[in-house]
Every structure is written in C-alpha cells, then in structure tokens.
Image: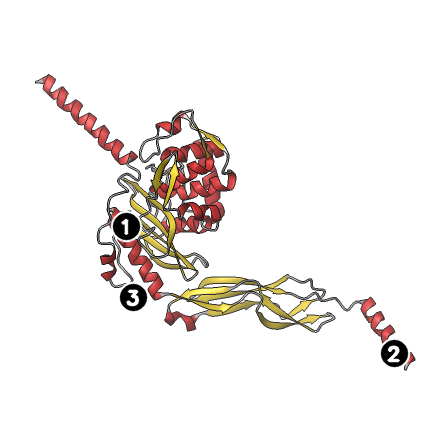
C-alpha cells in the first residue's frame, strides 16, 4: 500500500513539474496553427460611436505620428507581455550592435526552452542573422545570445532595456529578460508597449526585419510568426507572443495611404482570437478616423512686432507638419492655442524658436509644433542710428 502511494505521489509530482514547465516555457509555441474565420470577424460592427468589443484582456490602438490613442481597453493595466518583449530587445540591440559582428553562443543561451532556433553552444553566428531569428521565429536562444553580446550578461542588458523604457516614457514597464518568459517582475502595459513600438518603428532596420515574412537562417527557411503579415492589407510588422500567463499577444503595425497605426492585443485565448481582435480594432480605426491636415512645415501663421529691429515685423512659421487623426464630429472641436509674445526683442537669428502652437481636443493635447522666425533681423543700436544719420546727411549734401 505504501509503495503504491509513493508511486502515485511520484507520478503527481512529475506531472506537476511538467505542467508548470510547460506553462513557463511555452513561449510562442504552436504559432503555426491555422487562423480560422479571419475575414468573418469583420461582421462585428466597427463604425459609429459604439466602440468595438474584443476578447483580449487588454488592448490599444495608437496613431504612429501623433501618439494619439484611438482605442483602449485596460490600456494602463500591467500585464505579462511574453515575446512582444523582443521589440525592446531588438531596438536596444540595433542601437548598440552591428550587422556583421560575430556572436558566440553561451551555455545559457543554448539551454533556454520555449521557442528556439536551436543555437549550439560555442558556435558563432552573425548578429544580423540572430536578429532575424529572434524577430521572425521568436528564438529565445537568439534573444539571450544578443543580450549577452550587447550587454555582457542578460541582467546588464535588462538594465539597458529599462533605461531605454524610461527614456521613451514607458514608466509602467519593467524588464527582467530579453525574451519575456513569465516572471512576476517582468511586465508592461498596452500603452507602454505602444510607446516602445512607436519608438522602434522609427528605426529603418527594425522596420525591415519585422516586416519580413520569410527569410533563411543557417540554410533553412524561416517564416514570421506574425499572422497579420499577408492577412491584413497594409500590415508591416511587428511581433507575436505567448506564455501561460500572458496568453496570446500581438503587436501589429499597418500602413495605409501613408498613415501608420499600431494595434496591441494582450491576453487572447487563441491565435485566431488575437488575429480577429486585431482586425476588429484596425478596421475600427481606419473606418472611424481620418487624417486632417492643419498646417504644413514652413507655412506662415502671423506677423509679430519687433522692438528696436531693423524690420518692424517678422512672419512666424510652423516648424513641422501637423496632421491629426480625427473622427468627423471632432474636426470643429480642435482648438489651436498659440504661445507667443506680443513683441519680440531684436536682434533675431534665423531659425530662432519664438513660441509654440498647441492643438487641443476636449482638454487633451494632440500635437504641438515650434513656431520660428526664419529671417535674421538686426537691432537698431547706436551704430544703426549713426549710419542712418550719415546716409541721410550724405544724400542732402549730394542734392
């Protein structure tokens, strides 16, 4: 009886360990399962004032250019983010590494579980190849190898990731690893993850990698785990993720008519649901918002008086384009608040910042642009007046 009991307990313990390990290490596994009824999900209403409903635990849609939030669901709540972590891993690595650098694989990298590209301890790979392996196939071993190469260790690289997050403004985020396997101290929010993605998408190499559907690694074809590439028109990135705690996660970038938006869904039950949820949110954004141009860079706005200037007035120009994603009923509600002095003191240099123009909707700042003087204006000093008097006297004498 005791032997039987011990055997049963042993089996329970082994099974428990296996189940626990599966939950922790199951990152991005089964990413090739088919997507079912993707286009059929579009039957859900996405137009009008009613916000769409999605099965994700949390989600956000962000305008790339302005950072305006177009949709949110629990967007500021901390959540496990699985391999979407690798967005930050990639941008930190790209800013500190070089494509042709050699990366030697450590025992720690080769031994990691979950989704891997089967890197071998002691073998050398090119940095660029590992970047593609990490972002397309979500290789956890590639993520560790890159982190150790750039930061010296996983822990030091995580510090680099956290410094970059703070720099970007992702203040409700903490990274422990470069791969995103479940850890209670490793988390972000949809909003922070959107800010990180927005920052990363400004890097051309990053865009090239995450927009690649298929590549070759060590002689074998590899395909991107991001199901939205090829499924949703205009999709051009960025990263998938899955762990037991995080659920199915997906960060998507879509560009249509030079307008790029970012959608994020976290905590979806299946790969199909995360794809459908992403489609619903993207459809909602593109169908309900349009870009309205308010001002072009270099466009003159008004003229300001110049005190003691050789010119009495100077025109003030916008230093950037301002185009805002708005619903039709919001267009007339946008207020432009100019922060300018009534008079400018001479002298003035060309390109000097004179003030700002803020574009505000319902009390929220949507965009801001610097206002500059593009003309050099001298000051009416003693020499100016002396020169003026002398020239006047010379004309009188000549006449």
Q: Going from the N terminus, do you reach mark 1 or mark 2 first?
A: 1
What quarter of the picture does the C terminus occupy? bottom right
Crowding near pointer 1: few (<14 within 10 Å), some, many (20+)? many
Q: Residue furthest left?
A: 1
Residue 170 visible to an observer of this rendering: no
Mark 3 — residue?
47
Residue 388 visible to an observer of this rendering: yes
Disc number for residue 274? 1
Mark 2 — residue?
395
The percent position of residue 322, horizontal first and vertical second, equals: 50, 64
Residue 274 position (above or below residue 325) = above
Crowding near pointer 3: few (<14 within 10 Å), some, many (20+)? some
Residue 386 in which image quadrant: bottom right
Residue 137 in which image quadrant: top left
Label 1–label 2 contact, CB within 8 A:
no
Q: Secondary structure at mark 2?
A: helix
In the picture, measured across the screen, residue 37 lies left or right of residue 114, that is: left
Residue plotted at (44% across, 65% down): 324
Give the alpha-carbon distance from disc 3 to disc 1, as whole Å: 20 Å
360, 371: nearer the viewer: 371
């Amino acid at each position: 009886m005791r032997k039987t009991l011990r055997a049963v307990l042993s089996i329970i313990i082994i099974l428990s360990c296996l189940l626990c390990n599966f939950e922790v290490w199951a990152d991005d596994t089964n990413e090739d399962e088919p997507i079912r009824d993707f286009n059929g999900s579009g039957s859900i209403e996405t137009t009008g004032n009613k916000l769409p409903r999605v099965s994700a635990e949390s989600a956000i849609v962000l305008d790339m250019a302005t950072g305006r939030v177009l949709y949110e669901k629990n967007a500021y709540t901390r959540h496990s983010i699985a391999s979407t972590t690798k967005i930050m891993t990639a941008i930190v690595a790209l800013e500190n590494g070089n494509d042709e650098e050699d990366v030697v694989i450590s025992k720690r990298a080769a031994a990691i579980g979950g989704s891997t590209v089967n890197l071998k301890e002691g073998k050398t790979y090119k940095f660029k190849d590992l970047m593609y392996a990490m972002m397309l196939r979500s290789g956890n071993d590639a993520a560790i190898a890159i982190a150790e190469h750039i930061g010296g260790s996983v822990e030091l690289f995580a510090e680099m990731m956290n410094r970059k997050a703070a720099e970007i403004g992702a203040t409700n985020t903490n990274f422990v690893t470069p791969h995103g396997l479940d850890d209670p101290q490793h988390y972000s929010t949809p909003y922070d993850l959107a800010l990180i993605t927005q920052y990363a998408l400004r890097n051309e190499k990053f865009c090239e990698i995450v927009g690649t559907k298929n590549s070759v690694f060590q002689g074998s074809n590899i395909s991107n785990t991001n199901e939205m590439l090829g499924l949703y028109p205009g999709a051009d990135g960025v990263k998938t993720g899955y762990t037991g705690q995080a659920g199915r996660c997906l960060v998507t970038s879509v560009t249509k008519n030079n307008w790029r938006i970012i959608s994020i869904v976290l905590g979806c039950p299946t790969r199909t649901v995360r794809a459908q949820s992403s489609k619903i949110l993207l459809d909602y954004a593109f169908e309900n918002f349009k870009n309205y141009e308010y001002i072009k860079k270099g466009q003159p706005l008004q003229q300001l008086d110049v005190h003691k200037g050789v010119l009495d007035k100077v025109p003030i120009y916008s230093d950037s384009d301002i185009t805002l994603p708005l619903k039709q009923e919001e267009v007339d509600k946008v207020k432009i608040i100019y922060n300018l002095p009534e008079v400018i003191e001479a002298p003035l240099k060309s390109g000097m910042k004179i003030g700002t123009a803020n574009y505000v909707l319902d009390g929220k700042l949507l965009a801001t642009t610097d206002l500059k003087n593009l003309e050099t204006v001298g000051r009416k000093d003693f020499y100016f007046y002396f020169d003026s008097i002398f020239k006047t006297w010379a004309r009188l004498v000549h006449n």
